[in-house]
């Protein structure tokens, strides 16, 4: 039986699904399963037998345990549940998730508990203020990726060695067009700055992540922001920032290359 059909087999019965998830979650005796799963005693026994025959659960002397296959199926079921929660918000339909590297798209279910903050028509700048205030409250412990120039964000970006700033190449080039010498490019003396082609906005503090994707038609959207504070989302955001940071060019090198080519 293929992995796809095994998952389909488990999902084909709510009792099988609930029993497998309960065993993985630690309810490993028949008594605990019968008490915890909303089904008749016979239905729970039948589900356990079905899962054992498929190699997803095994019986010990007094307890049940998930096999490695059972754990993997349970993990996939959890991901599917999180994906459904994520897709309940139209943000993911209207924005270009392809702007994210594929391995981070595959982990997007880690943002299942995120909140999508939207500005209203009567207060279109509400999200910009919200992000600005969160960056300002973070103090010096903040990592930022920005594909656009935003004066409000620039004003609160700390100049400190604990902070990091990555700007899109087009933003950096526009800034260089307005100066005459490399020394004028040193806006932040302490904050490390790097340059990379990037379409995604990210803010990572010690307690939250902020994410902004372009719309499906490629426009920058300053009126919505994805904000999350749970541990899984924080790990996703930190990993995404490091992905971009490791591939970016230090600002000093970028500036030197641009002036050398003039």
Image: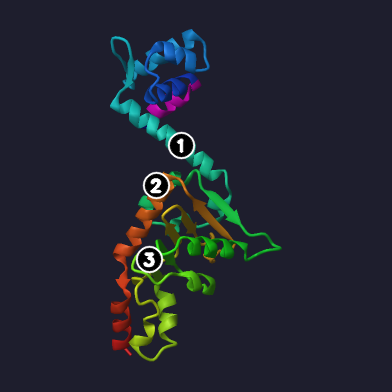
Q: Quadrant of residue 255?
A: bottom left
Point out the tag, 3 or 1, that comes first from the N-terminus. Answer: 1
Using residue 184 as the reference point, say whether residue 125 is left or right of it.
Answer: right
Which x, y percent locates residue 175?
A: 43, 82
Mark 3 and mark 2: span between their CA atoms?
A: 28 Å
Q: Which mark is residue 80?
A: 1
- What residue does disc 3 label? 163
Neighbour tally class for label 1: few under 14, some 14-19, many 20 plus, Cα within 10 Å: few
Point out the tag, 3 or 2, that comes first from the N-terminus. Answer: 2
Point out the tag, 2 or 1, that comes first from the N-terminus. Answer: 1
Which x, y percent locates residue 39?
A: 52, 14
Q: Which mark is residue 41?
A: none
Stretch of the chain drawn in magenta: 6-14
Neighbour tally class for label 3: few under 14, some 14-19, many 20 plus, Cα within 10 Å: many
Q: Quadrant of residue 217?
A: bottom right
- What residue does disc 2 label? 106
Between marks 3 and 2 in the image, the one whose residue lies nearer the viewer: 3
Compared to residue 57, the image places residue 225 above or below, namely below
- Identify the residue shown where x is 49% and y is 43%: 112
Report the front residue among 209 and 223: 209
SS at mark 1? Answer: helix
- Identify the residue shown where x is 33% and y is 68%: 161
Report the front residue among 197 and 6: 197
Farthest residue in the right direction? 122
Residue 23 seen in this snapshot: yes
Mark 2 and mark 1: span between their CA atoms?
A: 12 Å
Which x, y percent locates residue 136?
A: 49, 64
Residue 1 seen in this snapshot: no
Neighbour tally class for label 2: few under 14, some 14-19, many 20 plus, Cα within 10 Å: few
Farthest residue in the top direction? 42
Helix, strand or loop: magenta stretch: helix
């Amino acid at each position: 039986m293929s992995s796809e059909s095994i998952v389909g087999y488990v999902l084909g019965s709510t009792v099988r699904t609930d029993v497998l998830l309960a065993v993985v979650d630690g309810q490993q005796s028949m008594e605990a399963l019968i008490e915890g799963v909303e089904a008749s005693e016979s239905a729970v026994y039948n589900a356990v037998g079905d899962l054992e025959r498929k190699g997803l659960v095994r019986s010990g002397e007094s307890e049940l345990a998930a096999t490695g296959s059972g754990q993997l199926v349970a993990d996939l079921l959890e991901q599917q549940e999180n994906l459904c929660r994520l897709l309940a918000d139209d943000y993911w339909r209207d924005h270009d998730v392809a702007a994210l590297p594929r391995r981070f798209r595959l982990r997007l279910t880690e943002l299942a508990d995120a909140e999508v903050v939207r500005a209203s028509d009567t207060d279109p700048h509400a999200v910009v203020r919200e992000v600005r205030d969160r960056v300002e409250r973070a103090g010096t412990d903040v990592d930022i990726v920005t594909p656009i120039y935003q004066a409000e964000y620039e004003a609160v970006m700390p100049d400190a060695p604990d902070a990091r700033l990555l700007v899109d190449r087009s933003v950096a080039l526009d800034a260089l067009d307005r100066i005459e010498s490399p020394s004028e490019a040193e806006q932040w003396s302490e904050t490390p700055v790097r340059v990379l082609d990037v379409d995604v906005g990210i803010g990572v503090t010690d307690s939250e992540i902020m994410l902004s994707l372009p719309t499906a038609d490629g426009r920058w959207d300053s009126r919505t922001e994805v904000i999350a504070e749970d541990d899984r989302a924080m790990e996703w955001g930190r990993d995404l920032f490091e992905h971009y940071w490791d591939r970016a060019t230090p600002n000093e090198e970028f500036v030197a290359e641009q002036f050398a080519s003039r």
